[in-house]
Each structure stands twice: as structure tokens, then as C-alpha cells.
Amino acid sequence: MDNIYYPRDAVLTDIKEETPTIKTFCFKLDEPLFFKAGQFMQLTIPGLGEAPFTPSSHPGKLTEMEITILRTGRVTDALHYEVKVGDHLGLRGPFGKGYPLDKFKGKDVLIVGGGVGLAPLRSLIYAIFDRIDDFKKISICYGAKTPEDQCFTDEFKEWEKKPHTSLHLTLDRPHPDWEGTVGLVPCLLEKDIIGVDIKNSYVVSCGPQIMLKFVTYKLLEVGFKPEQIYLSMNRRMSCGLGKCARCNIGPYYLCKDGPDMCYADIMDYPNVFE
Amino acid sequence: MNIFFLPESKLRNLIETLMGRGRLFWTRQKEKSITIEEVDEEYIGDYKIPDLRSYDTFKNFILPLRSKVAEYPDEKWEDIEETPEKTVLFGLKACDVIGIGLLDKVFLDDPDYIDPFYKKRRESLILISSDCSSVKESCFCDLLGNTPYVSSGFDINISPVSEGYLLEAGTDIGNEILKELSLSKADKKLIKERDNSREKVAKNLKKQNTKYEKPFAKDLSDIVKEGYESSEGWALGSTCVSCGACTNICPVCYCFTLFDRVDTEGKKSKRFMVWDSCQYKGFSQMSGGMNPRFPMMERFKNRYYHKFFRFHDRYSEYKCTGCGRCIDNCLGGIDMREVLANIKILETISG
């Protein structure tokens, strides 16, 4: 029987501490699992329940998966404090559509992340680096609260070394020796900082809902069109199959039609950023 | 389609034949309420098919309040292999049959994901429907383009006529059962009588709902979508107490959540599919505190929005059968007809 509610076995092989509140969980899978950057998984702790996460690892790695998780609720607390390397957890998925990379071909890509929102974007960044000549400029903007709250800092240098790629960082509360931008993520989106050709680019953004809201407004202000903006929307999810009906925006089910939505598609529906 | 005549005295034969096909649940008039319960063999002789739909719905037979969907006995997830027992549902009305058809669209007809548990349960059901022979105040199937009788979706349909019933098979199983009963074909006069009584009930229903006809003739999906920000109509929802009675009693509300728990020995983990309700505050509550439908009114609107716009957008049908159970059971006295009839689409100022 093809049981759609049944998770596959995933063995936890490593736990990396990214920040005091964010850890990356590495899994080994029995069978290859194909996912597109942006698609998400339902991660189960047996006996406790499931929560949806988008992998942060390279989509090309089929029997390994990394998921970077902020400690914020019941399941994530248990992940941070209770599970150990060697534990058997469960994975269902992948769900959703993933980022429309083919659509971005020949364009500049602006990647805007905040906090743990860089996790799904890291998977996208790897996917983009795999075929970097398909795109023009790649501009990665990332904001975190403090230097300690930044994820994947050890990879930043490598990212910057890639051809036609730039990285722009901001911190809300930096240390005194910080020389970069200070402020929330939208302050990176001034025309002269991002360095992309606004008319010929796409934006992908992931972060807390409140950040997505102000990033979107800022992007519109500097001249992006709603059609160019892709947002990783946050909603509660359970089934992942477009049935249990709690993750909707307008007619869309984020678990099936998203979770990355083109702003033009959702902007006219109620409660987009509530 | 062949239509057969079953004399009043042989209703017992029909019920007993059906009992041979599986566990039989019927609708039964009990004091003021029509209940759904397992057949009472001692009562078969006195049994009358109720005129109206039951108080409760048959949803629980296909989409149980709680059902196990996965198990984790020992460091490995295991599939559940359970075959549901054959069940005969007796006395469904048009709204019940249509409701099951709508649930099928969600759980069976989706090419990407067929719910294996739903499928098994659905296949184990035999549906015996019957025409409505009167009208309840809250009934409004007519406003949604339905009738108080159905012509498909059942295994056997029963229509009361003088001195008996007309039986019509809708599936092979239905035909098989009717063959077992070796009944004579219904003559034209009886079929005419059936058509007349059907028409009479439909007419009474239409009369009762006349004042809603005009607003319901409009595109309801447009009304809830374009009228979302309207203050009229929705204001009738201000007495809502978010109890979830409307969604629980609805034959087509299927929202659920997956819920895991460990057994008492603390070893075996089980996953359940449990009914949920979009009217509950926690329905879309996320960790971190965000909740896009925190205000009661947002949840109240969501139910209509989902039924008449979102579902319609995907399945080209309204997720409502017009059975009126939500009206009967609302603690706030909210009438879905009144809400929909009063939503005003705000005129947009162009240019």
C-alpha cells in the first residue's frame, strides 16, 4: 500500500551547531531521495510529531540530507535537546514545487535571506552554483541579529569566490569592530548596494514573515515588479499534500503550490503577511 | 435503468438481504431526532425510512474522527494493513450522497495522492439512499443546484410510493442485490407517482427558500472572494463562538491534522489522522506565535472562503451540499443562507 502518511527512515549522522539557537541536522537515507531546492520535508520525531522544514543541503546529494533548524517550538525543542546522533527519525516528502530555476535563466538573481531563512536559500545557492553560467549576476543579501546569529559563516568566503557572485551582509546589533552594514535586511536593498539589473532579474527571499513583508515593500519601492519576487511563505502545515487545508493563501495551498510563491500571484488575497 | 417495485411488507427482506452484505447502519426517527445507528433486528418490522436527512452525518464512516495511519514499533516505521469491515449505510439522503462524492474528489480523485485508507474504507461501503419526502427549515440543497433526490452516487436508491417503494440500482453491486430480491419491474404509473412526489418536495423546498434565490443565483465564489472585505453579511458571524460544531457536523468538511503519540509503555509510536476545524484558534497557529487567522472573524470567513471559493477554484464545485446541518447546530444561531445572501461586493473605483 502506498501510504502517504508514512515517513521513510532517516538516521541522524551529525548535528552541527550553527548559532546558539540554530543547528544543522545531517541525515543518511537508505534510498536516494530527489528534491528540488525549495521543496520541503516533513521531519518526524517518533512519538512526538512532525514539522515542515526545507533542506539546506545540496539537492544533488541523494542519500544525504541536511536540515538547518531554529529552536522555536515543540518539535524543534526536542530536536535541539533530545535527539542524538544515531537516532532514527522519519522523513516524508519532498513536498511543494521548489524554486523555478529555469525561469531565472539568463537573468540576475537576487537572494535575500534573514536569520535561519538562509537555510533553504543555501540549497538554492548550491543549485545555482552548479549551473552558474545560466545566470548573470548572483547577489546574496543576508541579515542576522548579531554576529553569533549568522548561519553558514564558514561558507561565505567560498560563495564570494564564485564568478559574478557577491555577498552583502547586515547585522541588527553588530560588535564594535563590524565594518559592514547595520540594520534590518531591507536596508541592503538600496539600488547601489545590490548591484543587479533590476529590470532583468528575479528575487528570491526567505525569512520571518515580518521580514518578507518589508523586503517586498522595499523591493517594490526600488523598482521590482511583483512578478519578479518569489517569497518562501510561512504557514502551518500538516499533510503536505494539499488536503488538510491550513496552509492556504487565497486559492493556493502552500504545501502543494508553494511554499515559494510569486508575489504577483498572492498579492491580492487576504492575510498574505498577517 | 431498471426500476423495481418493493411492496411495503417486503422492506424487511431488503434490510435482511443488505445485512448479509455487511454491518448495517440505518437512519431512524427517534422522538424528535433522526439518528444514525446500527440496525436493531427487533425493530425491523416497525421500521420506517425517515422522511428527512439524519441529524448527524455519515462522514465518520469514511473519514473517522480518529484513524491510525502509521506505526513505529521499534526503530522502524511500519505500514498499517487493516481491511475495514463491509458496511451498509442505509437511508442516506441526496445531500449525504453528494457529500460523499465531494469527499471522493479530495481523497480519491487527486491524481498525485490517493489516500489509501480512505480508498479502502470507501470500497467497503454500500450506499442505500432514499428520496426526501418532506423539507426541513434549514434545508437548502436547491439553492446550490441540487435536488432532494439523487440519480447517481448510490448503490441502491429507494423512493417511497403508495403501498411500497421503488428501487433503483446505481452500481453493479446494487443490481446484484436487487436480483437477489427477485422483484417485479415498476409500472409506469408508479414511476409517474414517484416523479410527482419528487417534484412536490422540490417545490416545497423552493418555496421555503424563495427569498434566497436571487443572491444564490450569483456566482458564490465571486461573492466570498470579492466580498471578503465587505462589512455586511459577515457581520452576522459576530455571534460565532468558534466551537467548530459547523465543521464537525458538515458532511464535507474534511480538514484534519496528523497527530503522533506514544503508547502507554512508551515504546510504540503511532500516527493518527484526526479531524480538525478551521474554526479553532490553533488551526493555523505556528511556532513562534504567528497565526494568519487569529481573529475569530478571519476564521469565520475562511470557512465560507474555502467552501465557495478555494474548493471551487480547484474542483469546480462548491464544498457544500446545502444539508443545513451547520444551521441546525450553530450555537450562535448563524444561518449560512443569510450570511451568503447579505455579503455585498464592494464597488471598486476604477481609474
Image (spheres, coloured by chain):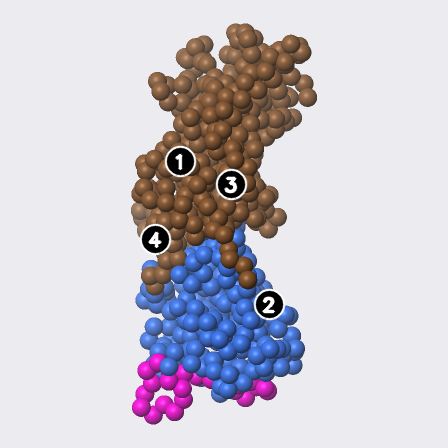
* Same subunit, tags 4 and 2: no
What is the spatial separation of the Cα atoms under label 3 and label 4, in whole angstroms? 23 Å
What is the spatial separation of the Cα atoms under label 1 and label 3, in whole angstroms? 16 Å
> Which amino acid, by three-letter code, is at mark 1?
Asp
Q: Earlier in the sequence, mark 1 or mark 3?
A: 3
Q: Nearer the viewer, residue A224 or A129?
A: A224
Magenta stretch encompasses residue A74: no
Q: Nearer the viewer, residue B21 or B1?
A: B1
Q: Nearer the viewer, residue A3 or A148?
A: A148
Q: Earlier in the sequence, mark 3 or mark 4?
A: 4
For disc 2, the marked residue is A100
What is the spatial separation of the Cα atoms under label 2 and label 3, in whole angstroms? 31 Å
- Residue sitting at 43 percent across and 68 percent down? A213
For disc 1, the marked residue is B335
Say which mark, if any, is on residue B319. Answer: 3
> Which amino acid, by three-letter code, is at mark 2?
Pro
